[in-house]
Amino acid sequence: MKVLVPVKRVIDYNVKVRVKADGSGVDLANVKMSMNPFDEIAVEEAIRLREAGTASEVVVVSIGVKQAQETLRTGLAMGADRAILIVAAEDVHQDIEPLAVAKLLTAVIAEEEPGLVICGKQAIDNDMNATGQMLAALLGWPQATFASKLELGDGRATVTREVDGGLQTIAVKLPAIVTADLRLNEPRYASLPNIMKAKKKPLVEKTPADYGVDVTPRLEIVKTAEPEGRKAGVMVASVDELVAKLKDEAGVL
Amino acid sequence: MAVLLLGEVTDGKLNLDATSKAVAGAQTLGEVTVLCAGASAADAAGEAAKIEGVAKVLCAEDASLGHRLAEATAALIVSLAGDYSHVVAPATTDAKNILPRVAALLDVMVISDVSGVVDADTFERPVYAGNAIQTVKSADPVKVLTLRTASFEAAATGNDAAPVETVAVPEAPGLSEWVEDHVAASDRPELTSAKRVVSGGRGVGSDENFALIEKLADKLGAAVGASRAAVDSGYAPNDWQVGQTGKVVAPELYIAVGISGAIQHLAGMKDSKIIVAINKDEEAPIFQIADYGLAADLFTAVPELTEKL
């Protein structure tokens, strides 16, 4: 069974986000970019399936700017077999919306015919938490989102999901879309020999036009602003002072 | 303009807090119809009908809707969506699972985690873990959005009940089935609707030590939360996680214990009314947003605080 993993190039999660003064967006020029952390977990899960003999091939796909090939090389260095890059934007500040991404992935899936797709549950830039669900809808496939455990067997996947009250386990028919939550696994670091090997693995480049998909955004970004700041309050010297402040000043006790 | 709002129904019961906050958030978008769906949903529908600002309630009962599986619930919403300009829901894990599927079936973009409604087409939402607030304007014929409950005051519940109608349920797609739930039984208030929250971080040091956090929470009648670092270290279960990748809370009192204040945690709690931080590191970033900071060893300060409350 082939496993397909969509990955996104995003601002590195350790980088301090700076909103541009003119309100046009977040400054991404000369900022360290990395694979979306949830997508790393998805890649790791797919590689483990191949190592266990359940999956035969792992294909990573990225949609975005040309530089996303670095993100794909990271996936290949982790152990994915080959990569597909769909160059859909020229400017690093242009985000391709989940609906357009899902349409492109639908076309890729029609060609590749994977038995399973594992996505990250959300990208840490637009925080939409939507691509996996939208892809499942367009394909008419079942979806198992926010996965913390995945077991495959007999034409179905049993998935434990992180939900508000605790955990929910569901079974979905394959092919299916699974989206990875934090506790699914701990992704490996790519070793130097594997990083070298990854440079030789196949990476094909496509465009949205190759798939006949229109990636025009549906949402116009009117402005991007700094959130309202919270001012630092006061330091108290003791528990007694804290209790007194909470009672008399804040009135919350 | 008319709004179809997916009520938060779990095992036949309405989550009144989440649903009435979403009703309040959707009020300016048009007349609100609440959809209550489940294996049994009549009681929930009756309760939703009493939320002020609700014009009508639709009740959909079918075994296939029993565990909020996305495929069946999305198919139901799509079958009803033609009459509405907006399809909305509180931004719970259930709705975040279902609504993007609905949006794609309607060929529109979903707008997740809306924190402010500017007008019928324009919405504010946090991006980059709350480090930026984006204002987006939708050109789609139907707007599908989830509303961040921490951003809206709950609509009141009155005595006048809106009419409840039963709706037909489309045939279930049969793609998925429920196996089991592991819901932690607790007498504590639910994290996202609690008036008080006590959270522990990596500084707590072990899952045994988390008992200190729980004792303080129980003394205050508070819910217990945790930072992602504490969850990753195995000190606390994931459904306690507060932050970008966990739950977003805005209680009247938030006490952060042994939490340094990573951006990802702040994203989940910085709208709290009063924030208290207890941390032995005076330089911890949490103190920059706390109303009251106590630089002290949590292992002495927390028991003392529990004692003196």
Image: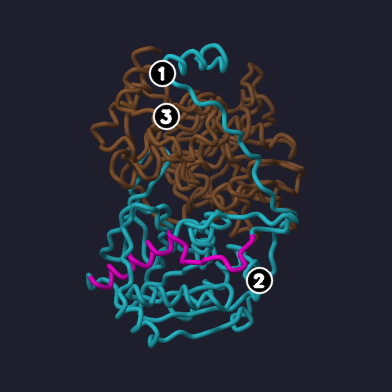
Please give the chain letter of the residue carrying mark 2: A
**Which of the pair B202/B43 is nearer the observer?**
B202
Query: Going 41% across and 86% down the picture, which residue do you hit?
Result: A202
Please state the horizontal and vertical placement of residue B47, each as a whole percent of the image.
Answer: 55, 25
Report the predominant secondary structure element of the magenta stretch: helix
- SS for dot 3: strand
The dot on residue A122 is: none
- SS for dot 1: helix
Camera-nearest label, 3 or 2: 3
Image check: A56 left or right of A209? left
- What residue sits right under mark 2 in the picture? A215
Asked whether B125 falls inside the magenta stretch, the response is no
Q: In cyan, which chain?
A: A
Chain B colour in the picture: brown
The dot on residue A239 is: 1
Camera-nearest label, 2 or 1: 1
Amino acid type of the residue that numbered disc 3 sits on in the rendered structure: Ala
Q: Quick one: label 1, few (<14), some, or many (20+) residues within 10 Å?
A: many
Give the extent of the magenta segment.
A27-51
Image check: B156 left or right of B211? right
- The Cα atoms of the two marked residues, 3 and 2, are separated by 51 Å
Tell me the quarter of the image containing the C terminus of chain B: top left
Please give the chain letter of the residue carrying mark 1: A
Tell me the quarter of the image containing the N terminus of chain B: top right
- The Cα atoms of the two marked residues, 2 and 1, are separated by 57 Å
The reply to whether residue B135 is in sight is yes
- The Cα atoms of the two marked residues, 3 and 1, are separated by 10 Å
The dot on residue B295 is: 3
Amino acid type of the residue that numbered disc 1 sits on in the rendered structure: Val
